[in-house]
Amino acid sequence: MAKKHSMMRFSLAWMLAAVFFTAGVACAGAKKPYPTVNMLRHGWQLSFVWHKPHRIYVAVGHGIRRNLREFWFMRYTVTNNTHRDIFFIPSFVLATDTGNVLRPVTGLSPRILDKIRTVTGDQFIISPGLIAGKLLQGDDNAKDGVAVFTNVPFKARRFKIFVSGLSGDTALQKNPLTHKNVVLHKTLQLNFWIPGQSVRIVPQPQFAGKRWVMR
């Protein structure tokens, strides 16, 4: 009987130790929460409707230097449903799973823009160089734009498109390398993946989700 009580006390001691250990870990975790950013303000947000990226080939150059060049484009419509006019300055970045980070083509030639308008059937697409500016309120003042990228690696199977300029929300975060404060902007992240490409088959990007991030 004494041996049985001794074993019970031993088991109870281990159970209590486990409880206190778990509580200690939980408290330690509470003291070190996941990194967060300090919001500076909660501002406006524009309505942004996008279409899946599309690949086209456009003849560029003249004479013997003329050749087909590959472009990827994503068209979109931005609408100001806030209660004030907004100065809209969009910013796009395309990041691939091959490690490439691409900025959009800004100076589109009329030939490229005409090709995009023909493919989409949208004759109201504004050149990227002209879309920035005051965005008036209401659906009647919505703007149709396009983000165009080139040099997207053929081997890329996944890519993300980051869109900023859609929100007035900003945050403050310390750069871990320079220890200086930097301002982050609320940014829309769109994720896509491309099924395996075969000869003479046009790749059809598939939507893989979206989220808002601060960057």
Image: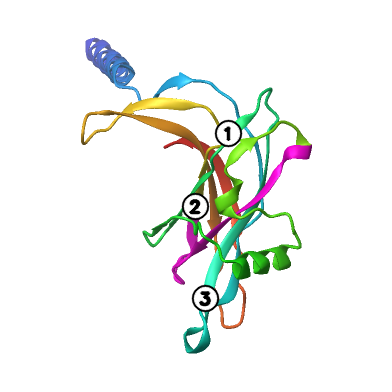
Which mark sits nearer the N-terminus, 3 or 1? 3
Q: Which residues are magenta?
A: 140-160
- Crowding at dot 2, Cα within 10 Å, few <14 / some 14-19 / many 20+, comes out as some
Q: How many marks?
A: 3
Horizontal placement of 43 versus 52: left or right?
left
Q: Residue at x 66, y 24 (%)?
A: 84
Q: What residue did someone put label 2 on?
A: 160
Residue kind at label 3, given as amino acid type: Arg
Q: Quadrant of residue 46?
A: top right
Which mark sits nearer the N-terminus, 1 or 2? 1
Q: Quadrant of residue 5?
A: top left
Asked if residue 81 is among those painted magenta in the image, a careful observer would answer no
Horizontal placement of 146 versus 34: left or right?
right
Q: What residue did someone put label 3 on?
A: 69
SS state under label 3: strand
Q: Nearer the viewer, mark 3 or mark 1?
A: 1
Q: Nearer the viewer, mark 1 or mark 2?
A: 1
- Crowding at dot 3, Cα within 10 Å, few <14 / some 14-19 / many 20+, comes out as few
Q: What residue did someone put label 1 on?
A: 87
Residue 210: x and y, percent?
57, 44
Quadrant containing the C terminus is top left
SS state under label 2: strand
Residue 146: x and y, percent?
61, 54
